[in-house]
Image: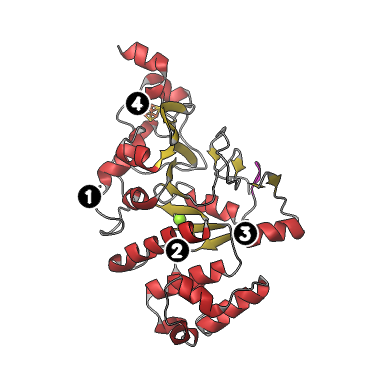
Amino acid sequence: TKHFPIRRRLRTLFTKQRAVHAVEQVDLVLRKGRVTAMVGESGSGKSTVARLLAQLVKQTDGKILLHGDVVHATGGRRFRAYCRRVQMVFQDPFASLNPIHTVRYHLTRALKIHHSEATAEELLTRVSLTPPERFLSKFPHELSGGQRQRVAIARALAAGPEALLADEPVSMLDVSIRLGVLNLLRDLRDRLNLAILYITHDIASARYFADEVLVMYAGQVVEGGGGEAVTQHAAHPYTRLLIASAPDPDRIAGAESEVEEVGGGEPPSLIDPPSGCRFHPRCPHAMARCETDAPPRLTVESNGDGPHWAACWLYDANTVEAAR
Ligand code: SF4
Ligand code: MG
């Protein structure tokens, strides 16, 4: 499509080793045994990133790498292997299961497609729907939202994935059961050594369980770093605004209704984004250069958890000099 919001490189790589250096706007590395949270308002492009990684849409530019090999959307064996290894969990558990089929059907079908050795019972046990026999014969309407999302996760696991792309997996669930589903994802990260991309507009939930946090604004990643660094010491003015708009930043994930509106105006159109720093029309710290020059990624702090950076002129050494 012409007006694709992510114009630059899109890279993903699964490796047990170390991070590949981020070089462009959406340059994303998922690593086994890690949760990477992508946080932003609706319309920031975060769901598009997940759909791109799942290859539900194709990128017009940029690359996806798996274990260092470029994934080509050719439908060949390697592409099919990629699609098996990278599974998506959608936001709406009510739409993702077919109402006329039982849980058994959904799971055995997924197992057959992926020639998996696992069984439907094992999958249900993995997502804590026990005893599994009780759930196999149920239809989606006989399950709660949380149970359906667990079935959807079990179905994703049928493929034996290395990565789960979870797009707002708890935002449509009852507040009281969100934490349970997030804990399940965390548990799967640890037990199955999965790479998880957790997409959310709720920065408090990212704080709760992400190893790494990326903040998206207007189709670009504007801040990134370790989960604690970004959520406790937010550097980018937009991230600070997100945190300030959360009902209670210290609350436990999902314990409150989510923030749909963030103070200080609307997110901009991705078709005709603002010049310079895309956040400048809303930014309380905007300077003259912000209107004309797009800020590069500037290091806020380097620590053992990898660099904490922000695409913001406030972290430019020259800017600091000028302000003194
Ligand atoms: Fe605000 Fe300028 Fe930083 Fe953009 S670059 S976030 S406008 S201070
Ligand atoms: Mg979305």
Q: Amino acid at mark 1?
A: Asp
Query: SS class of the residue under badge 2?
Result: loop
Q: CA distance from mark 2 to mark 3?
A: 20 Å
The residue tagged 4 is: 286
Q: Is residue 178 above or below residue 34?
A: below
Res. 312 image quadrant = top left
> What secondary structure is the magenta-colored segment mainly?
loop
Depth order, front residue of 33/293: 33
Q: Which residues are magenta?
A: 59-64
Confirm or deny contact between disc 2 and disc 1 (CB under 8 A).
Answer: no
The residue tagged 2 is: 91
Q: Residue at x 44, y 30 (%)?
A: 311
Q: Is mark 4 within 8 Å of ligand 1?
A: yes
Res. 19 image quadrant = top right
Badge 3 crowding class, 10 Å Cα cut-off, few under 14, some 14 to 19, many 20 or more, is some
Query: SS class of the residue under badge 3?
Result: helix
Q: CA distance from mark 2 to mark 1?
A: 23 Å
Badge 2 crowding class, 10 Å Cα cut-off, few under 14, some 14 to 19, many 20 or more, is many
Q: Nearer the viewer, mark 1 or mark 3?
A: 3
Query: SS class of the residue under badge 4?
Result: loop
The residue tagged 1 is: 248
